[in-house]
Amino acid sequence: MARVFAFGETVYDIIFKNGQPISAKAGGSMLNTSVSLGRLGIDVNFVSDMGKDPIGDTIISFLSGNGVSIKFIERYENRKTAIAIAFLDERNDASYTFYKDFPVNRLATVKPCFGEGDIVLFGSFFALTESVRSILLQSLKQARENGCIIIYDPNFRKPHLHELEKLKPYILENIAIADLVRASDEDFDLIFDINNAQDAFKILRENGCDNLIYTANSKDVIMISQEHTVSEVVPVIDPVSTIGAGDNFNAGLIWTLVNHGITKSEMKHLPENVMENIISSGISFSAEVCKSYENYISVEFADRLKSGLTK
């Protein structure tokens, strides 16, 4: 079975609703994906960094308890683990304030070894951050050379729009190294000023990526390759919180690739039925997360999926 490596930032989420704290838990886009995959029994390695402090200890214990390898997490002396304050609005969508305390040089001791067929996920602002970018790119290039499937999730948000001119070359470089980009309509609107899946796919193809998954909140999800275009309607739900919805779409996507045994060479010619399964899993994972203040699929949901494979 393929191993998964998820590169991303670690934060501790404190969630507020109506001015009151209602939940606190380990967070960060790739961490959320990793925990869901760990609960499913996938061999998942979270590649990140955090402080040697009580919150960091809590997160490490949580990851280990949910089947996520902590082998490639760098921890810093005399530094505090990042905190994210999430404020839920009337639709239970979140806006964030971050408190971070990172050293200038990060991830210097983190050296994953990749094998053919492994899956590498990266993205969010972490993938554009100067202090980690050179090491991240080095790892991604090694993963590509070793035959890994590489998935990029830009997860680009308005607070960074003033930096877009500087960051856009990095985003294009990330697209070029990826086998698949899973991005939202907001990503493409902010980065490229386009608002439809076909134009988004054209941008990807011009920059060397062959597969797009285009999500648009509660609208249809569309997946486009060189050979097929498939879509699925997103069911109407009443979300408790939308935190982690996109992260867990990624978990459903990876879950499907692993269970179909898809290789890097097959990513150029994905069968239509696999594309349909990818979308369906992504939507169901996202919907599951929106039912609670958890950032990850529930243990019960994971257990149902695992038992379904053995029937």
Image: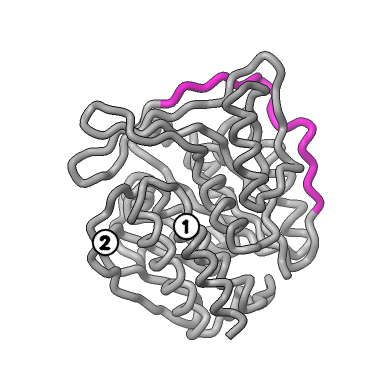
Judging depth in this view, the residue of 172 and 59 nearest the camera is 59
| Magenta region | 98-113
Judging depth in this view, the residue of 81 and 311 nearest the camera is 311
Tell me if residue 269 comes above or below residue 201 in the rendering.
Answer: below
> Which amino acid type is shown beneath numbered disc 2?
Ser
User: Which residue, given by chain and number where applicable, does mark 2 sit on?
Assistant: 218
What crowding class fits label 2: few (fewer than 14 Cα within 10 Å), some (14-19), or many (20 or more)? few
Q: Main secondary structure of the magenta part?
A: loop
Type of colouring:
one colour
**Residue 61, x across and y down, in percent:** 64, 38
Tell me if residue 241 comes above or below residue 20 in the rendering.
Answer: below
Left or right of 273? Residue 132 is: right
What crowding class fits label 1: few (fewer than 14 Cα within 10 Å), some (14-19), or many (20 or more)? many
Total labels: the figure holds: 2
Left or right of 187? Residue 64 is: right
User: Which residue, given by chain and number where applicable, does mark 1 sit on?
Assistant: 297
**Residue 154, x across and y down, in percent:** 47, 48
Judging depth in this view, the residue of 144 and 39 nearest the camera is 39
Left or right of 100? Residue 16 is: left
> Which amino acid type is shown beneath numbered disc 1?
Ile
Q: Residue at x 78, y 47 (%)?
A: 112
Marks 2, 1: nearer the viewer = 1
Q: Is residue 128 visible?
A: yes
| Residue at the left extreme, as displayed | 90
Mark 2 residue element: loop
Q: Earlier in the sequence, mark 2 or mark 1?
A: 2
**Residue 204, x across and y down, in percent:** 48, 61
The label on residue 75 is: none
Q: Residue at x 58, y 42 (%)?
A: 8
C-alpha separation, residue under disc 2 versus residue under disc 1: 19 Å
Q: Does the magenta run of residues contain 108?
A: yes
Question: In the rendered image, which quarter contains the N terminus?
Answer: bottom right
